[in-house]
Image (spheres, coloured by chain):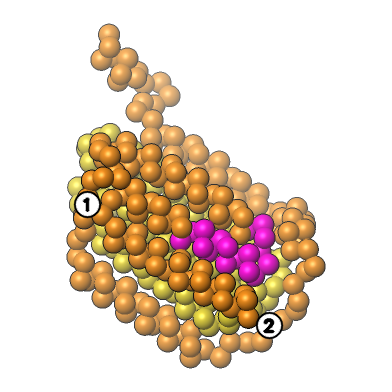
């Protein structure tokens, strides 16, 4: 177990999540892709902390990443609820006007 | 040696279940696969001595995936464990972008001359992070607290069917 091997695993997780975030049509599945990307970021941050500088600051950074994941999920669920209520659908293709 | 074997086992489980999220034919199974991936990464964090954060990741993500399964049942209006589904667009483009990103990241990971480790981990890492959060890094946690509170308010405002002074559409329909 080296820094490089752990980072390669983290990169694989990130890219699988990236594929999901780009390709999926259902909002909840897009959120799953984003979650998987953050999963990779958590693993990479843990590896950087352990192999480069095992000071408490790195653990605080990891806490912030985990918090970001929580915020993303909460807001994603709220937007999905709003979309479903107003349009009766939770498909991304039917919410393209949100980008305008 | 044991750590290496355990890590590779967890790595295979994490990536395989991550792939399974977008390969299985029902959303409920996808949710379980994502939960397994998170548990594997949480256990990998335990290998780094991050006992507190590893347990937080495992507990939080298992609960989060349970909530996600409930959302799917609510929104999809079907038994998500039984209904096959495949709702993707731009599959080839997405695969190409993901593959290219992995190639760039892997090249960076393997080509960069990573520095040596500086310092040694504290004897009690959980105590160290507790002291950091309650001491020198308190501003970070105070900011996180405000962000989480704002998230609660924003999510409620978005999700509720009516505002503070509006009538509930359900009440109007009933009357």
**Disc 2 from disc 1: Cα separation:** 47 Å
- Using the image, determine if residue B148 lies above or below residue A36: above
**In magenta stretch: residue B132:** no
- Chain A appears what colour? yellow
Let me know if residue B132 appears in the view: no
Q: Mark on residue B117?
A: 2
Q: Is the C-beta separation of discs 2 and 1 under 8 Å? A: no
Q: Position of residue B14 (x, y in %)?
A: 46, 66
Q: Residue B95 has which mark?
A: none
The magenta segment: B37-53
Most distant residue in the right direction: B123
Rendering coords of residue B164 (x, y %): 43, 24
Above or below, A46 against A89 in this view is: below
Residue B117 horizontal/vertical position (percent): 68, 82
Instruction: Check the image and report above or below for B155 versus B43.
Output: above
Task: Name the quadrant containing residue A24.
Answer: bottom left
Q: Is residue B124 left or right of residue A98?
A: right
Which colour represents chain B? orange
- Which numbered circle lies on residue B85? 1
């Amino acid at each position: 177990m080296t820094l490089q091997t752990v980072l390669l695993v983290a990169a694989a997780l990130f890219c699988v999540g990236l594929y999901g975030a780009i390709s999926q049509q259902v909002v909840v599945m897009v959120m799953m892709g984003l979650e998987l990307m953050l999963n990779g970021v958590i693993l990479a941050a843990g590896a950087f902390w352990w192999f480069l500088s095992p000071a408490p600051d790195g653990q605080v950074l990891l806490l912030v990443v985990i918090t970001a994941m929580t915020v993303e999920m909460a807001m994603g669920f709220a937007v999905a609820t709003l979309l479903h209520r107003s349009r009766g659908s939770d498909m991304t293709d039917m919410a393209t006007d949100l980008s305008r | 040696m044991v750590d290496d074997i355990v890590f590779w086992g967890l790595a295979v489980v994490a990536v395989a279940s991550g792939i399974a999220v977008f390969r299985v034919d029902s959303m409920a199974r996808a949710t379980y696969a994502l939960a397994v991936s998170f548990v594997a990464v949480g256990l990998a964090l335990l290998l780094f001595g991050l006992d507190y954060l590893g347990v937080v990741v495992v507990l939080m993500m298992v609960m989060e995936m349970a909530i996600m399964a409930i959302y799917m049942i609510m929104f999809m209006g079907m038994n998500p464990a039984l209904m096959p589904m495949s709702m993707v667009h731009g599959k080839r483009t997405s695969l190409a972008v993901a593959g290219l990103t992995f190639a760039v990241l892997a090249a960076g990971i393997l080509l960069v001359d990573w520095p040596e480790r500086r310092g040694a981990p504290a004897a009690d890492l959980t105590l160290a992070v507790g002291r950091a959060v309650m001491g020198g890094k308190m501003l970070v946690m105070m900011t996180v607290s405000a962000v989480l509170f704002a998230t609660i308010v924003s999510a409620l405002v978005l999700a509720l069917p009516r505002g503070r002074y509006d009538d509930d559409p359900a009440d109007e329909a009933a009357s």
